[in-house]
Amino acid sequence: MLGKQLLIVVLITWSAGVDAQGQMSRDAYIQSYADIAMKEMVRAGIPASIKLAQGCLESDNGNSRLARSAKNHFGIKCHDWTGRKIHHDDDERNECFRRYRTVNDSYIDHSDFLTSKPRYAELFLLQKNDYKGWANGLKKAGYATNRQYAELLIRIIEENELYKYDEMVLAGRLRPGRPDSPVSPGPAPGASREILVNNRIDYIIAQPGDTPDGLREEFDLYPGELFRNNDISRDTPLEPGMVIYLQPKRWRAERGNETHIVQEGQTMWEISQIYCVKLGRLYRINYLKEDAEPEPGTGIWLRRRKPDENLFRNRLPGPEEEVPAEDSTEMEFEFDG
């Protein structure tokens, strides 16, 4: 009798993709998180293949200490993190890493991290299924110190055919839910209204009666995603005609939109929404304290750091002047391991 019970336990453990030591297999890891990887590809534009490969590599298929104790599957360090933390030896001893409530939170924050850092901006100009370009770009931008980082990611993707998840998303044949589940015959999220695009980010215009909960259900958003995407608090009313971004805003405006002249009564948040640029980023590159509101006529820089405050005094370049080059401090590397 005891022998049969042990056999049952072994069979159950094996079928779940976990060995006798409690280690998750790579196949089990991929099946567990392909859903969230595809949903994040739709939301943030990061190939599902890249996200899954990084998750496999950075978390040792979900078996590393950071993955088990902190739900941190991408080795992202604290930096400007204000949430829970864990200390772990990496490039140096006792380094600070982000701690998450769930693995899904780690996957979402990985997207937000990449979309908020200027050094990764060029990656989002690649084709959505260019996993080789992404792998090499992550290495070049300093995501990891391992010289073989790009090659390791590409090998994981090709050995496990992770590029198929990119194809599923791009072809619209499958949607997040389960990787092997066909799209239901019902209407796609948000099919009842027009989806517009600004700075390569999807948005809608709020209609009478729209609520955060209603939009979350209509567009299959995460809890709090609408507020984060639009730099608004949870108690901000959604007024008809309001621009509502369905994806994270960019870190700089489109080419050709170098500067903006503040109009009477115009706020930094409104400028952020007009150009689809993260509000915090606008404050930083214009050397403004958060919540500060510049005077009408002030020049707000939208793509790069404002020139020296004392030299230019917020003055925009004249027709004969050359716009300064990108501030090199915007490309400083942080090794995230």
Image (tube, rainbow, N blue to C red):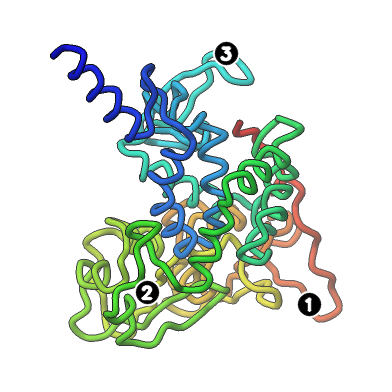
Q: Is residue 310 visible?
A: no
- In the picture, the disc for residue 244 is 2
In front: label 2 or label 3: 3
Please state, as top left, top right, bottom left or bottom right, where the N terminus lies in the image.
Answer: top left
> Which quadrant would residue 183 be assigned to in this image?
bottom left
In front: label 2 or label 1: 2
Query: Residue at 21% across / 13% down in the picture?
Result: 3
Location of mark 3 (residue): 93
Q: Position of residue 273 (x, y in %)?
A: 46, 72
Measured along the vertical axis of the image, is residue 273 above or below residue 137? below
Mark 1, Cα crowd under 10 Å, few <14 / some 14-19 / many 20+, is few
Left or right of 93? Residue 310 is right
Measured along the vertical axis of the image, is residue 103 above or below residue 69? below
Location of mark 1 (residue): 318
Mark 3, Cα crowd under 10 Å, few <14 / some 14-19 / many 20+, is few
Q: Position of residue 306 (x, y in %)?
A: 68, 59
As helix, strand or loop, the secondary structure at mark 1 comes to loop
Q: Is residue 243 visible?
A: yes
Please state, as top left, top right, bottom left or bottom right, where the C terminus lies in the image.
Answer: top right
Q: Nearer the viewer, residue 124 or 168?
A: 168
Query: Residue at 26% across / 67% down in the picture?
Result: 216
As helix, strand or loop, the secondary structure at mark 3 comes to loop
Q: Nearer the viewer, residue 68 or 174?
A: 174
* Residue type indicated by callout 1: Gly
Query: Residue at 53% across / 48% down in the picture?
Result: 51
Mark 2, Cα crowd under 10 Å, few <14 / some 14-19 / many 20+, is some
Left or right of 313? Residue 232 is left
> Which quadrant would residue 25 be assigned to in this image?
top left
